[in-house]
Image (cartoon, rainbow, N blue to C red):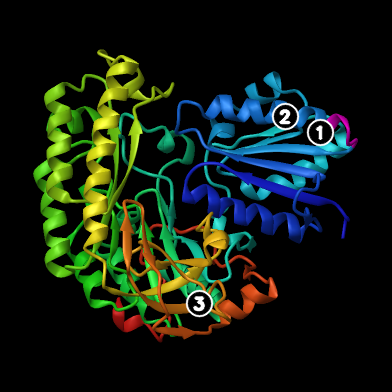
Amino acid sequence: MNGKTYLVRTYGCQMNVHDSERLSGLLEQAGYTAAAEGADADVVVLNTCAVRENADNRLYGNLGHLRPVKDAHPGMQIAVGGCLAQKDRGEIVRRAPWVDVVFGTHNVGSLPVLLERARHNAEAQVEIVESLEVFPSTLPAKRDSAHSGWVSISVGCNNTCTFCIVPALRGKEKDRRPGEVLAEVQALVDQGVLEVTLLGQNVNAYGVEFRERGAFADLLRAAGAIEGLERIRFTSPHPREFTDDVIEAMAATPAVCHQLHMPLQSGSDDVLRRMRRGYRRDRYLGIIDRVRAAMPDAAITTDIIVGFPGETEQDFADTLDVVRQARFASAFTFQYSKRPGTPAAELPDQLPKDVVQERYLRLTALQDEISWAENTAQIGRRVELLVAAGEGSKDAARGRLSGRARDGRLVHFTAADGVRPGDVVAAVVTAAKPHFLVADGPLVSHRRTRAGDASEAGTRPTTPGVSLGMPQIGVPAPLPAAVSACS
């Protein structure tokens, strides 16, 4: 053991959160230990995002705050990884010469070696590679949650959305073999995990690399056959590749939650064309209709961008119309921000900030109204909740705990003796707000779980790295015998 401590700070999407679990696992394998809450760490890793306009300012602001901390602690190291590191490369060290290591999205596994090299050579190490060296899932991981785990099924993206910089930073799509994905899921379930979320930049395009149609639906069914796995979620699919076999697998596989996050981005066909999204509003609404026909209780959420270059008032009205028709349970809404390196940044007719802001406020007001109405319809419903930690900032003051229903809705419920994060409870919804539900009243039931035992003991699952190596084009490896009938 080297006796040094570490802290990983994560910015951005679920893929970054999962990468941070790998970074923590790598550092612990190299002999580092997690720094105590509030303590200064010997190594601080910033795992960055490049999607939003203020990502650069946020990174350099945080690095500025770390400089006097490092000056006061000789030997402290600072590392920057993730999408912004892949984009800015040596510029980071030029602007913040107190940074010791810069690594990209394709060489996460290099971090411990780069830290040691920077320490030995007494100079910054910048290592950015252009393609994936090892699939992230070959790396050890220290999981954040005792009851829920991320499982990456692919990395990279083959789409060319004009507003998105991710394909340039994450590369072309690389798919894991189904047997490797299922082995990782099994490893988590063996440690008490009840819920997994399958991750991909375009999760339902899974199988494109080994040319197997229907691979994602098969994977859902196969994962659902793993004993002890109670909930399966996935994010994020793309409407262009979304097929009916996925809807059928969701409806027919009890473990798959009736929750779908389906990014819309815009309700205007003209804007969707300029975004290069590959679908139009009628196709999108058709998917929503078919999902609800198969699963009437499904909660559907989305992403929407307001103020894309050239968006007219009629284009925006089309978006509001789709929102009214789709009746999303909730939506992540964004004001368009120009990202250097994306085609949209060079488009004419960039909209004034005040126009974008005014439209954004109209959209969020409409979606809040719909979300509140949809949540109000849940009052009186019995919900099964997987108890979480830290989901409700006011829980302690109000004598409540929080959990997620199977459809993904957040529910704050009356605390009861012996209920722990990771346990499963049933409660009856008594009130609703736009962004959460309330269940004030006695619990209908409480089931203690191994995940709850782990939470109480302060332990978290670890995975040593589950893979047979990088996937190759060709016939996929067979599924494990217990689930091969589902393929």
User: What is the CA distance from the residue labelled 3 to the residue labelled 1?
Assistant: 42 Å
Residue type, mark 3 in image? Gln
Percent of width and height locating residue 52: 45, 31
- Between 86 and 41, the one nearer to me in the picture: 41
Q: Residue at x 40, y 86 (%)?
A: 482
Q: What residue is pinned by disc 2?
A: 65
CB atoms at circles 2 and 3 under 8 Å apart? no
Residue 465 in the figure: left or right of residue 66: left
Q: Secondary structure at mark 2?
A: helix
Q: What residue is pinned by disc 1?
A: 69
Q: Quadrant of residue 349?
A: top left
Q: Nearer the viewer, mark 3 or mark 1?
A: 1
Percent of width and height locating residue 82: 57, 40
Q: Secondary structure at mark 3?
A: helix
Q: Quadrant of residue 209?
A: bottom left
Which residue appears farthest toward the right when viewing the image? 74
Residue type, mark 2 in image? His
SS majority, magenta: loop
Q: Quadrant of residue 123?
A: top right
CB atoms at circles 1 and 2 under 8 Å apart? yes
Q: Residues within 10 Å of mark 3 (few under 14, many from 20)?
A: some
- Between 112 and 411, the one nearer to me in the picture: 411
Residue type, mark 1 in image? Val
Magenta residue span: 70-74
- For the C terminus, the quadrant is bottom left
Q: What residue is pinned by disc 3?
A: 186
Q: Nearer the viewer, mark 2 or mark 3?
A: 2
